Structure formats: C-alpha cells, structure tokens
Amino acid sequence: MNRIIQFILFITVFLGLYLMLNSYAVLRLGGLLGIKRSVLYVILAVVTIAIPATMMIERRFQNLFTRGLYTIATYWMGVLLFLFISLMVYEIVSRFYEVPYAGFIILGIVAVLSVYATINAFTITVNEVVVPVEGLENEVTIAQMSDIHVGTIRNSGFLKNLAEKTNEIDPDIVMITGDLVDGSAPLYKSMFDPFNKLRAPVYFVTGNHETYEGVDKVYELFNDTKIQPLKNEVVSWDGIQVVGVDFSEDRAHLGNVLSGLKINKSKPAVLMYHPPISMDAAKKAGIDLQLSGHTHNGQIFPFNFFVWLVFNHVHGLYDMDGMWLHVSPGTGTWGPYMRLGSRNEITLIRLVKK
C-alpha cells in the first residue's frame, strides 16, 4: 500500500509541475505567435496528458502506432525543455531590447537544438580510461555499459549495435551497471539475444528501472542469455573480485550488503552499483573501483545543473583517495530520444598494475 501511495504522490507532483511548465511555454509562445487562446488551451491539454496516456496505452497495446505516439510524447519533453530555456532568455533580453518576430526566432532555435540533440542521441562513443590497481596480476579490460533503457524507443536493434561495437573493442569482461530495461513497454526474452553475440562474459546489477519493471521478471528474461545477474554477491574472475549489489533507495543499503560479503582486501575488487553514492562504505569494504551510472550526465543541457545539485559525482573517473569511482554518462537515453551536452558511451576501462 505504501508503494501505491508513493506512486500516486509521484504522479500527482509530476503532473502538477509538468502542467505548470507546459502552461507557461505553450501560452507564452502562443501569445508571441498570435495564436488564439482557445486553440492554445487544447494544445496545452494534449501535451500535458500525452505522457501518462501514451505510457498506459503502450503498456497495454504495444504496436507500431502506440510506439509512435509514445515516442512523440517523450520527444515533446525534450522540446519543452529547450522551449522553456529559450523563453527565459527572451524574457531577460526583452527587458532591454524589443525582439522582432520573437516567437518565430524562438521556434527556430528550439528546432535546431532538437534536431542536433536527436542526431547526437543516435551515436555511441567509446571512451577509454586507465585505472591503476594494487595486487593486479594481469591487465584487465572492462567494457562498462549503463542506463541502456531497452523498451519502447531502445530495442533489440540498438542492442545489436552495442554488441557489435563492444566486440570491436574486444574487452575481457562486460559490466552493465543497471537500468538495462526502461519499464516503458512490455519486454520479451528475444530482445536480449544480441548480447549472446558478445565474446566476453557479461555481468549485470539492477538499477531503479528494473525495480519499476519488477526485478524477478527482469531476471527471468535473462534466462538462456549470457547476462549473469549479480544479486548482492561476489564472484572471482581472472584474478579480480567482481562485486554486484542490487539497487536500493536506502542510502545505507550498500554498506549493509558489503559488510556481509566475504571480500578479500588483498585482492583487486571491482564493485557494480547503480547510483554513484556510498563510496566511503565501498572503500571501507576493500573495493578498488566502483562502477556506477544513473546520472546520464544530465542527458540534455541544461538539466546537467539539476543533476549536479543531487549528486557530487556525475560523470567520469574520480580518485576517491585510495579508491576509484567511475560514473558512466549512460549508454542509452531515458524519455526523449535526445542528448545535448552529453553522449551515449561505452567505457573501456583498463585496469593496470599500480
């Protein structure tokens, strides 16, 4: 019951904020363009209810048409962000200078940003980082993926591209640090078949979106695939300890789980944990490298600034004074098929002798 109440509260708050944002953007831009208020109210109602409505429809009746509706609805979220920021800039500029054809200029700017962000979301980059580790016998290469978000927009075709690109860089091991699934559409086992083409072993831990979908249901989908979930456990692999901890909203969760695991502090240990938090607990447990994701590096500028307010470590490699943390910017996208100021990334991490 508590979870249901939390969900209802979340939806209520989200729709309230979303309505306020849409109201300002639609009515303000519509006023600059000279569109009738009656028409703007219809547009406002449609764009506000589009997200929850298309999510429910897509979950129940998945087909090409519903997929298109959901894609358009989520795409508007990205457009709305660009529109809101552009209007904010206009409000400031217009106090000192009367901007002719302001509405059309704003539309043009938003269109350019939206097209660029969409094109950018189709690309997958490979970023290589080097991490020195004490006690390492041989150099190990890890391909980290995170926040792929397989669902309505990202599908098996995207996973096929990921598998091909990963095989090209030829890592020793693949680690997926949560949010492999999105929770936006029904899933089926064959979606993950492309990952069976990966030459390296594949380890996985849950993220918040797996909890939305249902963790046991997600685990069942991985049967007969190369994806091996780590459920609050540690396994040995080629001289290193691979530690996987399930996602939890409880900030004490990681420390509690690690304290109950048998981690040999004299041997290299790599931790997979979705949110980039609780590094002190990881360091205390003898972890050499923590791999996390969750932040998407903000995904769409200027949302990056809001993410920085929540997390101290948002993207890249951090030296935690005796332990390393790497935060993936995400390999896929959530919501709008857009990236601005960030990239989809597979991170090739080279563990070398310290």
Image (tube, rainbow, N blue to C red):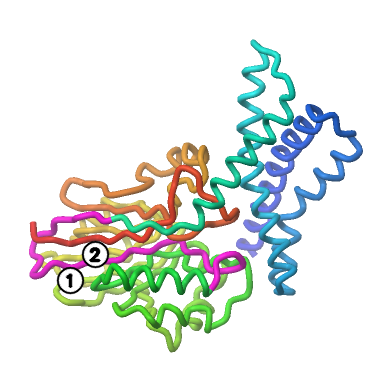
Q: Is residue 157 above or below residue 330?
A: below
Q: Estimate the spatial distance between the alpha carbons at disc 1 and disc 2, rounded to whole Å.
A: 7 Å
Residue 136 within the segment the image draws in magenta? yes
For residue 237, what is the image quadrant?
Answer: bottom left
The circle on residue 23 is none
Q: Which residue is at a point 73% across and 19% down the rendered structure image?
A: 100
- Image-based side of 158 in relation to 43, left or right: left
Amino acid at dot 2? Val
**What kind of element bears circle 1?**
strand
Residue 174 within the segment the image draws in magenta? no
Residue 211 appears in the rendering: no
- Image-based side of 309 in relation to 12, left or right: left
- Image-based side of 127 in relation to 46, left or right: left
The residue closer to the viewer here, 308 or 146, is: 146
Neighbour tally class for label 2: few under 14, some 14-19, many 20 plus, Cα within 10 Å? many
The circle on residue 270 is 2
* Marks 1 & 2, CB-CB < 8 Å contact: yes
Q: Quadrant of the N terminus?
A: bottom right
Amino acid at dot 1? Ile
Q: Which residue is at a point 8% across and 64% down the rendered structure image?
A: 135
Question: Magenta segment range?
Answer: 128-155
The residue closer to the viewer here, 227 or 321, is: 227
Picture coordinates of residue 242 (x, y %)?
25, 71
Q: Which residue is at a point 21% across and 46% down the rendered structure image?
A: 319
Q: Is residue 187 above or below residue 38?
A: below
Judging by the rendered image, the residue that carries numbered circle 1 is: 240
Picture coordinates of residue 76 (x, y %)?
68, 49
Picture coordinates of residue 231 (x, y %)?
37, 74
Q: Quadrant of the C terminus?
A: bottom left
- Image-based side of 190 in relation to 19, left or right: left
Neighbour tally class for label 1: few under 14, some 14-19, many 20 plus, Cα within 10 Å? some
Q: Earlier in the sequence, mark 1 or mark 2?
A: 1
